[in-house]
Image (cartoon, coloured by chain):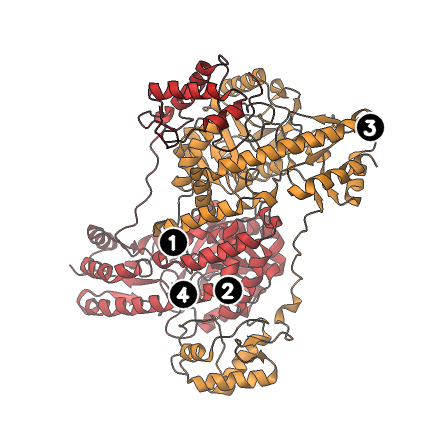
Chain colours: A orange, B red
Amino acid sequence: MTDPRPGSAGLDLHLDWSGRPDSSGLAEALRTAIRDGRLAAGTRVPSTRALARDLGVARGTVTRAYTQLTAEGFLLSRQGAPTTVAERLRTGESSAPPARPAPHPPRWDFRPGRPDLSSFPRKDWLSAHRRIVRNMPAGDLDYGDPQGPLELREVLADYLRRSRAVDTAPDRLIVCNGYSEALSLLSRALLAQGTGSVDFEDPSLPQFRDIAASAGMRVRGVPVDDQGIEVQRLRSPVTVVTPAHQYPLGVTMRAQRRSALIRAARSAGGLIVEDDYDGEFRFDRRPVGSLQGMAPDVVIYAGTASKSLAPALRIAWLALPARLVEPVRAMKLPGGHGFDQLALAEMLRSGAYDQHVRRSRNTYRSRREQLLRALDGLRARHRLYPAGISAGLHLTLRLDPDGPGEREILTRARARAVELEALGPHWVNAQSRPPGVVIGYAAPAEHAFRPGLAALLDALDP
Amino acid sequence: MTDPRPGSAGLDLHLDWSGRPDSSGLAEALRTAIRDGRLAAGTRVPSTRALARDLGVARGTVTRAYTQLTAEGFLLSRQGAPTTVAERLRTGESSAPPARPAPHPPRWDFRPGRPDLSSFPRKDWLSAHRRIVRNMPAGDLDYGDPQGPLELREVLADYLRRSRAVDTAPDRLIVCNGYSEALSLLSRALLAQGTGSVDFEDPSLPQFRDIAASAGMRVRGVPVDDQGIEVQRLRSPVTVVTPAHQYPLGVTMRAQRRSALIRAARSAGGLIVEDDYDGEFRFDRRPVGSLQGMAPDVVIYAGTASKSLAPALRIAWLALPARLVEPVRAMKLPGGHGFDQLALAEMLRSGAYDQHVRRSRNTYRSRREQLLRALDGLRARHRLYPAGISAGLHLTLRLDPDGPGEREILTRARARAVELEALGPHWVNAQSRPPGVVIGYAAPAEHAFRPGLAALLDALDP
């Protein structure tokens, strides 16, 4: 065969053409590719001209092969339309397990931890992304800084200072693929420094405790009361807390508790991880500044775009004491970041991020008020008590210990196409587990909130 | 203070306003925010109306505070322009180390492992991304499948079958944040199954050996001759190879060696990792299909968009034997993926990806030919021998063992603003280290290739 080089425009195709160097040999190679599934049903085949040039053969050879395959039903050729692989042929991969179906969101989605994704600012995002991709220097397409792009860390440092009173600078920020990665990097860096155990709030999100545990940390639970974590019961050199809005109980950590926590960390040479997952969303008063701003020497601040924009972005950030930057950075894989981190920087720069946060805050405040008003009637009758301050994306509802349990409420909800979460799995220690459910009121689309709320109430009070 | 709730449009600002509830108290709070750097120089402050509404105070209170601060030089107010924080004020973060400067790409960039980033198809990418972000269901913004979005795995399976003869299916693909993550996940999954050591080709890319080593694997080097890896010298149950185009030597693995490698893996119950980093780029003939296509039961196929599109995307993929999907998937952090993976799926679907690969292939073929012609003159005079087949993005040049060494060539090159790499660091074992340099001819922008080539030749033959 003469110089069958690939090139030119069209589909990139691997052909096993080791048979006869004529149209019947080519037809056989194409037939095999179709049978093997390398050419999937519906795929547009290259034009005769392009394939002839690629293979270094006469165009007539390709035309004859295509005609033959069309006659055999392998290819579908219509006047004026591109030639495609015919539909009726199955690929050779039928032995593979069927593809996992995409999970369907529930009809009435009250799962906590999710913002209203239907209000994601697609237009603002698209124009931020367009400005980035049009204007970035080619160097931004290369392997990047594992700490995250400097452009993002610069605007993020400004944003965190003014919105959350975080004491940081671009060089002390590390951008991560979500808080999960942040926690995994931290756990591994601290473990490498000899810290073998970590205290989590009890209750807290079990997924995060699992991440610390699979990194090799020993995980312990420390109870939370209505003032925050019980500082005198701390046992590990590192404590992960949610001071602005405890997850899932919703309390805010009181000033005395904050000072005590910082004093404890300083005197023990320990560290505090401040998970500020929804710090932007405080409804009744100005948000309390970050714990980190009070003690940047012992507090690691963690924030995320998962609640303010969308979990799919997989963007979170750590503001670290200077001495921890290199150890944590060393745990990141080399490489860099995609375009989403640059687009987020542009959203912060243009003010579109702030605007979206404020719009969302107004929405969630109103939803929380509607939810509380609706629950008011159930308070006395069913002994259901909302917990926590006026903030965030979720409300924990304490259940009557003598009434229907978590499982029954969830079953009733599911029967009404309502999805919410049980408090149970959040507990670390078995001794005190008052029952409850966690309601994520941010998740429904705007049009679905009221009918969803009606369905939710019907599940609580059938 | 009356109900100072945040809300409305504009900047999101954390104020520590615990002093007097009048304009002088507010001015003091703003002054502190500016001094602390929470309000950075150049930042637009909220409009008087927005801030008054946020704080629940009369608009006049805010106007008076702003006037005071403008008089003091903290704020900059110009007719018709938004009020901003004045430039002359430094933030309180001056104790932080200066931000790491963005690395400058060298003037004549011949670093291997990089495509021509100036030819990145920005327009095609933007329209793929726009279609995705406009049309995706809100559920795509939620936490996603750690295996990668099904949309991408579907088109990727088709693409790999037809272009590289990979035997796979969407359920056996795992999308990763670059080949670095792929290798890290694989190493950890295999280690968890009791596999403690891995063979790499000697020479090979040291960064990848480091990733396996930091995951806890024992790393060994197995020599490569002009047929590929020396199969009879394998020592570990897992072997990482680059069969299409050995990195960095550029040889292709011969058919007998391929069969022997597969037989060895099968008889020892071992595994082969096929790093197909530049398999799309073969210039002299049709590319040889993947090793994986011959033995999908023992070969793990790894591909990447870093060479075909851009390293910044951080997208690579593993095609795994069915029994390894869950163990590797379990090593991924929960969460999902950003928009870039969905945009890549759209690029594959529309054919824009194939077109870009073919355009790039033509460019790189022509560059390689020019480079080889230019090197021809040095062959006899300086005993510099190009190694490897006509493929890929790099050429390894063997140096005269009695001539100037790697370090001298690199120093000479750097003096001419040319960046390339030494072969030295790629070796695992000390015994046989013939000197060489690795030239990445794909990296320069189109307009820079010829002048860069002249500078490179001048460094080799001053």
Query: Three-letter amino acid code at disc 4?
Result: His
Query: Which residue has dot 2 on it?
Result: B350
Which residue lies most toward the left here?
B462
- The residue located at (29%, 70%) in the rendering is B369
| B338 or A416: nearer the viewer | A416
Query: Three-letter amino acid code at disc 3?
Result: His
Q: Is residue A429 left or right of residue B205?
A: right
- Which circle marks residue B245 in the picture? 4
- Which circle marks residue B428 in the picture? 1
Which of the two discs, 1 and 2, labels the residue nearer the N terminus?
A: 2
Indicate the secondary structure of the residue bearing disc 1.
loop
Which of the two discs, 1 and 4, labels the residue nearer the N terminus?
A: 4
Query: How many numbered marks have been drawn onto this rendered protein structure?
Result: 4
Mark 3 Cα shell of 10 Å, populated few (<14), some (14-19), many (≥20): some
Indicate the secondary structure of the residue bearing disc 4.
loop
Q: Foreground mark, 1 or 2?
A: 2
Query: Which residue has dot 3 on it?
Result: A382
Q: CA distance from mark 3 to mark 4?
A: 70 Å
Q: Are marks 1 and 2 on the same chain?
A: yes
CB under 8 Å between discs 1 and 2 = no
Chain of the residue under label 1: B
Q: Is residue A369 left or right of residue A7?
A: right
* Residue A309 in sight: yes
